[in-house]
Image: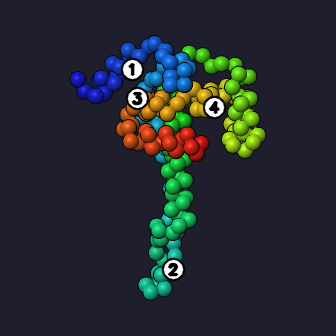
C-alpha cells in the first residue's frame, strides 16, 4: 500500500472527534499540499542588497549583508506561520467553538499588556475568531505536529515551524 493510499484510508477512518493535547475536542484532517504551497509562495524573499565593488568597477550582490540576513530570517518565520495558520484553519475541525466571552478576554488582556498583537485580526469576523481560538487556545505543539504530518510535512520541518509559530506569532 502506498503512503498516499495509507494516509487517505487513515483520514477516511478519522471520523471521530478526539481530545487534543489541550483537552479540547477536535478532528485532524488532511490539508491539500497545493493550498499550503500557494499560501507560502505569496511570501517572497527580500531583494539581495547590491553594492558597488570598487575593485571590479561594477555592482555586485551581497547576500552576507547583516540586514539582509535578518530580513531573510523574518521572511522564513512569516512563511512558517502562514503555513501553520493554513494547516490549523483547514486541518482541524472542532467539535464546537466555545462562546468568545469564555476565552477572548484573556487574549485581549495579553494584548492590552503588549504581550500579544491582535490588531491584525477582525474580532467581528467569525472565521478570524475561529483561527484565533485554534491558534492560541485549542492547538498545542503535539497537535501542530500531527496536523503537519497530515499535510505531508516531515517531522523536522513541522517541529521547526511549530517553534517559530508558538514563539513569534
Quarter of the figure that contains the N terminus: top left
Count of marks overlaid on the render: 4
- Residue 98 shown left or right of residue 73 in the figure: right
**Pointers 1 and 3 in contact (C-beta within 8 Å):** yes
Pick whichever of labels 1 and 3 is earlier in the sequence.
Answer: 1
Q: Which label number is shown at residue 126?
A: none
Q: Which label number is shown at residue 132?
A: 4
- Residue 80 shown left or right of residue 6 in the figure: right
Across and down, in percent, residue 61 comes to 47, 71
Across and down, in percent, residue 115 comes to 69, 43
Q: Nearer the viewer, mark 1 or mark 4?
A: 4
Q: Nearer the viewer, mark 2 or mark 1?
A: 1
Q: Which label number is shown at residue 11?
A: 1
Q: Which residue in the protein does label 3 denote? A: 150
Quarter of the figure that contains the C terminus: top right
Q: Nearer the viewer, residue 2 or 109?
A: 109
Pick whichever of labels 4 and 3 is earlier in the sequence.
Answer: 4
- Up-down: is 91 above or below 73? above
Amino acid at each position: 500500500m502506498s503512503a498516499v493510499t495509507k494516509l487517505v484510508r487513515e483520514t477516511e477512518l478519522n471520523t471521530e472527534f478526539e481530545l487534543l493535547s489541550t483537552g479540547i475536542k477536535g478532528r485532524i484532517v488532511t490539508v491539500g499540499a497545493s493550498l499550503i504551497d500557494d499560501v507560502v509562495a505569496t511570501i517572497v524573499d527580500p531583494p539581495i542588497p547590491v553594492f558597488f565593488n570598487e575593485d571590479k568597477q561594477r555592482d555586485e550582490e551581497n547576500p552576507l549583508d547583516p540586514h539582509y540576513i535578518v530580513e531573510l530570517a523574518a521572511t522564513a518565520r512569516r512563511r512558517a506561520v502562514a503555513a501553520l495558520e493554513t494547516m490549523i484553519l483547514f486541518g482541524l475541525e472542532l467539535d464546537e467553538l466555545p462562546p468568545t466571552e469564555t476565552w477572548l478576554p484573556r487574549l485581549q488582556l495579553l494584548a492590552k499588556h503588549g504581550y500579544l498583537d491582535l490588531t491584525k485580526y477582525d474580532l467581528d469576523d467569525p472565521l478570524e475568531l475561529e483561527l484565533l481560538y485554534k491558534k492560541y487556545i485549542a492547538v498545542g505543539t503535539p497537535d501542530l505536529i500531527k496536523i503537519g504530518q497530515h499535510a505531508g510535512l516531515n517531522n523536522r520541518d513541522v517541529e521547526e515551524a511549530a517553534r517559530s509559530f508558538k514563539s513569534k506569532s
